[in-house]
Image (cartoon, rainbow, N blue to C red):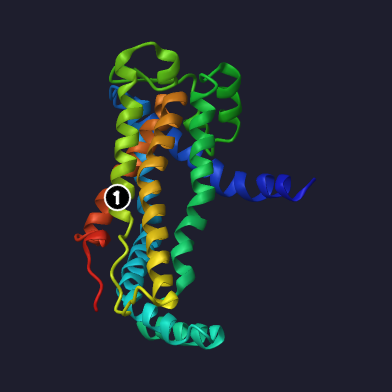
Amino acid sequence: MNPFQWFGTYIFTPIFYHPILNLLVLFYKVFHFIRLPGDFGFAIIILTVFVRLLLHPFFKQQIESAKKLQDLKPHLDRLSEKHKKDPKRLQQEQLKLYQAAGINPASGCLFMIIQIPIFLALYNTLSSFLLTGGSAKVIAEINKVLYSPYLKIQTINPWFFGYNLALSPAKSGLWYYWLVPVITAFLQYLQVQVATPQTTTSGVKKSDSSSSAKAPEDKEDFQKAMNTQMKFIFPLMIGWFSYTLPIGLSLYWNIFSIFSIIQYRKINPKPLYEQKGNN
């Protein structure tokens, strides 16, 4: 057994995939019991919100770290200019500045690292139902890993307000299915828009004849170009995935995007790209 198989068998499956699968079935059973129309769709929504709330502390830490780093940018630029010929001293001074502001530069990656296995587990869970069409064989395999016999299911109704959650817009042939990838791309654009800081003007004085003054400007131009690409290319890519994958996966992704936008606005009412650096 190679390391990837070992990780999947003993870590990913029992710690992430099985709990999320059981939660989805639990929510579905509750909504099915109360005869709520679109029970499986609402189960996906509640599961997505539950996972988003679970990740909220890490998401909040990421946003707070990003805000602090944005506030420190003018000071970091001045340090870069002052110690441009001494990289070791520059690193030491930057570390002191981070410590004084209570910032761990690596903490922003924590949210991304933690959510990767959870995202994969969510995708695998939904794929078990949607990409396979909820066949009898798949249902039997799902029932084997449920924590309680009361959670066992016979079938799944994929219909949710006129949409078959197991059908992709590419295969539907119906015009209103094509609205889903458009909405998905738009929501992803909004999420990137509120989460992407705009490069601010630093306090370092620049001179057209100075190559050292041009370096920060070139770096800012590169960052602006990257931010612009993220704002448009990534949403288009997600929209394409939404066009080719089952609607149920788009439902999960859209609820996650909406929840992220709301949480971001609540934590940071004024978007980072509207903030101005201190000169």
Q: Residue at x 40, y 48 (%)?
A: 230
Callout 1: few (<14), some (14-19), or many (20+) C-alpha neighbours within 10 Å?
many
Image quarter hosting the C terminus:
bottom left
Residue closest to the eye, 247 or 175: 175
Describe the element under mark 1 as helix, strand or loop: helix
Q: Residue at x 26, y 59 (%)?
A: 273
Residue 51: where, in percent of width, then height? 40, 48
Residue 50: where, in percent of width, then height? 37, 46
Q: Give the quadrant of residue 143.
A: top right
In this picture, is 221 found above or below 85? above
For this orientation, the residue located farthest to the left is: 269
For this orientation, the residue located farthest to the top is: 173
Disc 1 designates what residue?
193
Image quarter hosting the N terminus:
top right
Residue 239: where, in percent of width, then height? 39, 32
Residue closest to the eye, 115 or 26: 115
Residue closest to the eye, 174 or 49: 174
Q: Residue at x 23, y 59 (%)?
A: 271
Q: Give the quadrant of residue 234.
A: top left
